[in-house]
Image (cartoon, helix red, strand yellow):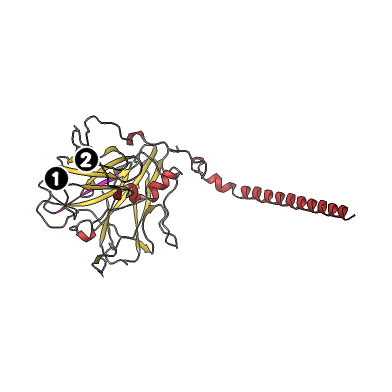
Amino acid sequence: MVAVMKESTQKRAIIVILVVSATTFVVLGYLFLQGVLDNQDTFAELPAEHTLGTQEFIPPSQDRIATTKDYLNFELSPIPNEEMSRGIQVWIVEAANSGILYLDTPQDSLTVTASNGESRPLNLILKVFYNYEEVNFYILGAQEPSTEFLFNLEAGYSVNIPIQLSDSIDAGDTISRLTVGVFNAPEYFVGNADEISDDLQFSPRINNAVINFEINYGFNDDLALDVEQFSPFDQSEFFGFSIHKSPASSEDGFLPIPRLPVVAQPGEEINLTLFANSRSSGEVFVGDTLLEPFLYDDFIVVAMLDWHQIPVSNKPFMWVNIEGTDPSFGQHVNFTIIASAEPGFYEFSAFLVPNPTQRISREHFYPLEIFPRFTIEVVCTD
C-alpha cells in the first residue's frame, strides 16, 4: 500500500511539473513574440546592411596593401627582447634626443626608423607632414615622390627608410615642424564589427606611432601659422580623445565612437564634434619633486580621409585655442568635413599635436595622441 501511494504521489508531482513547464513556455513565447512586434518599427528604420548582426563585411582596399618594389633594399634589424610588446614605434635617426632636427634645407636626407614590436607582421603606411600639411617625399630609389609609402614589416624587426622631401618645400625664417606617422592596417575598415576592428579602434597608440619633430634652420622664433583658430563651444569632465557625430558627451564621461559606418551622400558636408582633454602634459618629476603641470594653450588636429589629409571647416587643419579653459575639463569643438564625391567606403583618422608652434621642450616631447578611427560610407540614394 505504501509503495502504491508513493507511486501515485510521484505521478501527481510529475504532472504538476509538466503543466508548470508548459505554461511557462507559452508565456515566454508570447512575451518574445510581443517584443518582436513592438520593435518591428525600430528595426525597419535601420538600413539592412547596417542592422546589427546582419552588417555586410567591408573587404580590404587592395590599393592600401604593400607590394614588392624591386628598388627597395632596406636592411632589417632585430628589436631587443625588452622592447617587444611595445607596438609600433617611429623615429628619425638624424634627430637629437629632444626631437630637434638641425637642417640646412628641407631637402636634406633623413632616415625614418619604423619598429614592429608586435608578434605578427604588419602592413604599414608612412605619412609625412610639414608644418601640419601633407607633403610629397621621395623614397631612396624611387623616381617619383608620393604622399605615402606602403611597406610590410616582420614581427620583432625595425627598418631604416631613407626619405627626402620634395623640392617644392621652402625653409622659412622661423622653426618648422616635421610630423612623421606610421599607421597599421591602412587597407582595413573599422566599420566591420569584428575583433580586428576593435583592436584598431581601441588600441590606437599600439597600432600607430606619430611624432612631431622641430626643424631648426638656424632660427629660434616660434612657428607662425596663417590659419584661423577654432574655439571650443562647450566643455565637460572626461578623459581621452574622440571624434563622432554627437555634439555632447554622456553624463558619465564616456566618449563613444561610431561602430558602424557613418553614412553620407556624395559631396555631403558632415557635421562632427571633437572631444579632447589636452590642457596638461601630466605629472613631471625632477628627482622626487613634482613640478607644476605645463599647461598648453592650443593644439592642432590633422584629419585624413582614405589616408589623405582633408580640410576641416574649409581650413587645412584644426587649430584650437584653449587658453584660459579649465585644465580638469575636456573641450568640445564643432567642425565639418566633405564626403567623397564617389560612392564607397573611406577610413577617417586623425591625430592631435599639443603646443604646435613653440620650441620643443625635452620634458614634454613624446608620441602624439591618435584618435580612434571610423569608417564613412558614401552612398547614392537617387
State the separation of the CA atoms marked 1 and 2.
17 Å
Q: Using a 10 Å C-alpha cutoff, classify the residue at mark 1 as few (fewer than 14 neighbours), some (14 to 19) or many (20 or more).
A: many
Residue that carries the numbered disc 2 in the rendered image: 161
Kind of residue at badge 1: Pro
Label 1 sits on a secondary structure element that is loop
Query: In the rendering, which numbered label is found on residue 106?
Result: 1
Q: Which residues are magenta?
A: 166-182
Q: As drawn, which residue projects farthest toward the top?
A: 70
The x, y position of residue 176, in whole percent, is 16, 51
Query: Residue 381 vs residue 206: left or right?
Result: right
Q: Residue at x 42, y 49 (%)?
A: 258
Q: Nearer the viewer, residue 259 or 281?
A: 281
Image label count:
2
Instruction: Residue 336: tell me if it is visible.
Output: no
Report if the CB atoms under discs 1 and 2 are less than 8 Å apart: no
From where the camera sits, is residue 45 visible? yes
Left or right side of 202 for 325: left
Percent across and percent down for residue 243 are: 37, 53
Residue 34's disc is none
Q: Secondary structure at mark 2?
A: strand
Which quadrant holds residue 69?
top left
Q: Is residue 333 left or right of residue 110?
A: right
N-terminal-most mark, 1 or 2: 1
The C terminus is located in which quarter?
Answer: top left
- Residue 305, position as x, y percentages in the image: 33, 43
Report the amino acid beneath label 2. Answer: Ile
Task: Relative to 85, say whether 230 is above or below.
Answer: below
The quadrant holding residue 237 is bottom left
Q: Is residue 357 magenta?
A: no
Image quadrant in which you'd find residue 361: bottom left
